[in-house]
């Protein structure tokens, strides 16, 4: 098929719903914190928004809030695909040479092929884990400022390449995230699959910045809301941002206002609002 004739595949990026530490306004990073009731409802609304897309494959981080959001969102699919988490990840990786993880992956793949219902594989990968904030994790912004000093905390939060103690910089996060996106997610799109990626604010900030060729300062100002889908059409060579077209009868009035008002385009905010 010539590139001009190729149908466009759908890529949807979705941040997890509100977590319990989001609600408490604590640095969460890669601490494994579950969703709040509000976060569960956000995941349901996000699922309704993308219910008209027949996803072939789903990628999440290894963190529970990411997996919860993906599984809850898929309950709303109009294609009635059952999501199944493939233990061992897409590449069967855990520790290098972990034969048991490879067996788990292969057993799940066999079940996907022979199940008596439509299924969609869910692959959890640590490359999509949230940025590790190191010693800031579990602290509020105020507590972090008391412990480390306000100017130092601002530097860690505003900087692209400065790491907090025992943590990652945004640059570190971008390098691992974009590498995984290019090596694992784009090839699935090239195979003609529709892909859902459910991850975290900094992870999606990095992917969106890569797709939109944003500068470092633009990346830092980029805000990715919890529980909202961000859609892209892929034609085999380039990505075009597009609105996710939710079915007209999907939402309550409150859900519709939030989804339609925020998910059509990512927005730019204040660097100081990042956590």
Image: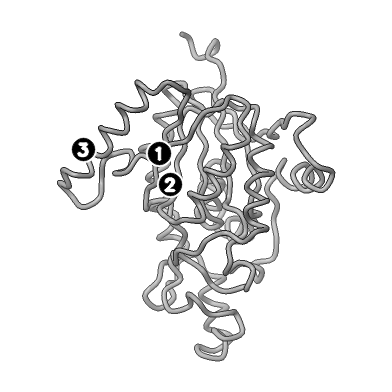
Instruction: Give the mark, 2 or 3, whose residue is nearer the N terminus.
Output: 3
Instruction: Give the mark, 1 or 3, whose residue is nearer the N terminus.
Output: 3
Q: Residue at x 29, y 26 (%)?
A: 110
SS assignment at label 2: helix
* Residue 7 percent location from the top left of the image: 56, 16
Give the CA distance from mark 1 to mark 2.
6 Å
The residue identified by callout 3 is 103
Say few, some or many: other residues with alpha carbon within 10 Å of mark 3 (under 14 / 14 to 19 / 20 or more): some
Q: Quadrant of residue 185?
A: top left
* Residue 267 percent location from the top left of the image: 70, 52
* Residue 39 percent location from the top left of the image: 63, 56
Count of marks, rendered view:
3
Please give the label number shown on residue 26.
none
* Residue 265 percent location from the top left of the image: 70, 43
Q: Residue at x 46, y 21 (%)?
A: 192
SS assignment at label 3: helix
Say few, some or many: other residues with alpha carbon within 10 Å of mark 2 (under 14 / 14 to 19 / 20 or more): many
Q: Quadrant of residue 144?
A: bottom right
Q: Nearer the viewer, residue 172 or 189?
A: 189
SS assignment at label 1: helix
Q: Residue furthest front?
A: 116
Q: Residue at x 58, y 66 (%)?
A: 20
Give the CA distance from mark 2 to mark 3.
28 Å
**Relative to residue 168, is residue 113 depicted above or below?**
above
The residue identified by callout 2 is 178
Q: Residue at x 50, y 77 (%)?
A: 138
Say whether residue 58 is left or right of residue 102.
right
Say whether residue 99 is left or right of residue 143.
left
**Relative to residue 78, is residue 21 depicted above or below?**
below
Please give the label number shown on residue 182.
1
Asked if marks 1 and 2 touch (Cβ < 8 Å), the reply is: yes
Q: Quadrant of residue 179?
A: top left
């Amino acid at each position: 098929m010539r590139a001009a004739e190729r149908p466009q595949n759908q890529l949807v990026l979705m941040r997890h719903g509100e977590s319990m530490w989001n609600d408490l306004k604590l640095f969460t990073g890669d601490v494994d914190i579950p969703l709040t009731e509000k976060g569960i409802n956000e995941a349901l609304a996000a699922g309704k928004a993308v219910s008209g897309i027949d996803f072939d494959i789903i990628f999440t981080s290894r963190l529970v809030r990411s997996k919860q959001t993906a599984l809850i969102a898929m309950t709303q699919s109009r294609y009635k695909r059952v999501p199944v988490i493939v233990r061992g990840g897409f590449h069967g990786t855990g520790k290098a040479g972990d034969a048991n993880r490879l067996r788990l992956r292969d057993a799940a793949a066999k079940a996907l092929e022979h199940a008596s219902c439509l299924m969609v594989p869910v692959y959890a990968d640590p490359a999509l884990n949230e940025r590790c904030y190191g010693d800031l994790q579990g602290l509020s912004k105020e507590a972090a400022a008391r412990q480390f000093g306000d100017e130092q905390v601002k530097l860690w939060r505003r900087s692209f390449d400065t790491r907090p103690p025992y943590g990652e910089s945004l640059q570190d996060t971008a390098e691992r995230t974009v590498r995984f996106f290019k090596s694992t997610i784009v090839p699935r799109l090239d195979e003609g699959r529709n892909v859902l990626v459910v991850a975290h604010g900094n992870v999606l900030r990095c992917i969106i910045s890569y797709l939109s060729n944003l500068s470092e300062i633009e990346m830092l100002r980029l805000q990715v809301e919890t529980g909202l889908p961000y859609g892209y059409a892929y034609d085999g060579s380039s990505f075009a941002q597009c609105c996710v077209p939710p079915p007209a009868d999907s939402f309550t009035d409150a859900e519709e206002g939030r989804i339609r008002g925020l998910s059509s385009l990512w927005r730019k905010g204040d660097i100081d609002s990042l956590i």
